[in-house]
Image (cartoon, grey):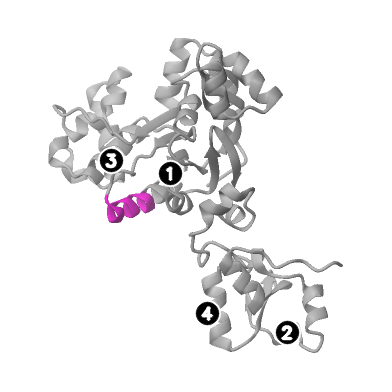
Amino acid sequence: MESNEVLIDCRSVWKVFGERSREAIGAITGRGLGKQQVLREFGCVVGVSDASLQVRRGEIFCVMGLSGSGKSTLIRLLNRLIEPSLGTVTVKGRDIAAMDAATLRETRARHIGMVFQSVALLPQRTVLENAAFGLEVQGVGREDRNRAAEAALAKVGLSDWIQRYPRELSGGMQQRVGLARALTADPEIILMDEPFSALDPLIRRQLQDEFRQLAKDLGKSAVFITHDLDEAIRIGDRIAIMKDGVIIQDGTAEQIVMNPADQYVVDFVAGISRLHLVKAHSVMIPVDQWRRQWPGVSLDSLPQCSPDADIDALIGKITGTGSDAIAIADNGRIVGVVTTRSLLLGVRGDAEPRAAA
């Protein structure tokens, strides 16, 4: 279950690769230079530019963007696989840049699991031994680490495969072993860098659903990197869209689709179906506005739906009742009305313009 507790707090973090990174950052902030200009003038590559985000307990936070957008660089800053050029990253309230090597290792081992696209299983070790490897490195005894690994493998549906070797597993099963390896140490945070991108579409969707359900059941927080907006919407509670190292917009999928920050985001979300994404509260019009437009119709005569009903449900209600409008009721109180017009605008990804009061 999500809470307001912030587990990862990333504030104005930069990563610029190159010897003149500080000069480059100054030029970006002072002169508004872009990524290509920085490369030409300073010989530096902008990985992440002034990124800020927070990940709360129990939340799945997706970071998406095209190749070169900075998303994989960002996730490596969150557990200090690379050092930031500027800014701070705190994990559970502690600045990871201030940690000594031993404390950083312990933080990674006990609080942060990581799953990469290339799961990198050890071919000479069994599934059980691969899942237990992280605890082995920590010096946990064989019996205890195997017990924890067996429990993690059971959670990902691989109890019958613990004595098999990676070569005997499909790609999807190998990714499950990688996830089990991350879960074995029971971390609070899981970082996932495009773990399903190389899989067939059907297996990929299955693993997406399984991962989301498992993370929610176990109360894990996750940062999930992807280049696929459909995947981000399917998995994420919130989504950040990156371009050229900059977080262009973050919010729920519904917020991003209904209120894109710029043309880049508009183009990104253009092909996304709104049927199960956009809810009634985003397409309804205020009661007073509806009454001015339909002065002779009683609200009590309209069929009702909740504010969380999606567009598909609203279409079903309108076609099933023959009504031209639906009253949106929250705890017995009508808070808005969805008209056929506002519903069609929602399908297109637009909000009904609000009339002046």
Count of numbered circles on the image = 4
Q: Is residue 205 magenta?
A: yes
Residue 300's label in the rendered image is 2
Comparing labels 4 and 2, the label whose residue is closer to the camera: 4
User: Would you say the residues marked 1 and 3 are in contact, meaning their CB atoms lie under 8 Å apart?
Assistant: no
Q: Residue at x 27, y 21 (%)?
A: 136
Q: Quadrant of residue 10?
A: top right
Q: CA distance from mark 2 to mark 1?
A: 46 Å
Q: Which residue is mark 4?
A: 316
How much space separates mark 1 and mark 3, taking CA atoms? 18 Å
Dot 3, how many residues are within 10 Å of its Cα: few (below 14), some (14-19), or many (20+)?
many
Per the image, the residue denoted by label 3 is: 175
Mark positioned earlier in the residue sequence (3 or 4): 3
Q: For mark 1, what is the residue?
A: 227
Q: Is residue 318 left or right of residue 100?
A: right
User: Which region is colored magenta?
Assistant: 200-210
Residue 206 forms part of the magenta stretch: yes
The quarter holding residue 139 reads top left
What amino acid type should be assigned to the residue bearing mark 3? Gln
Q: Residue at x 42, y 48 (%)?
A: 228
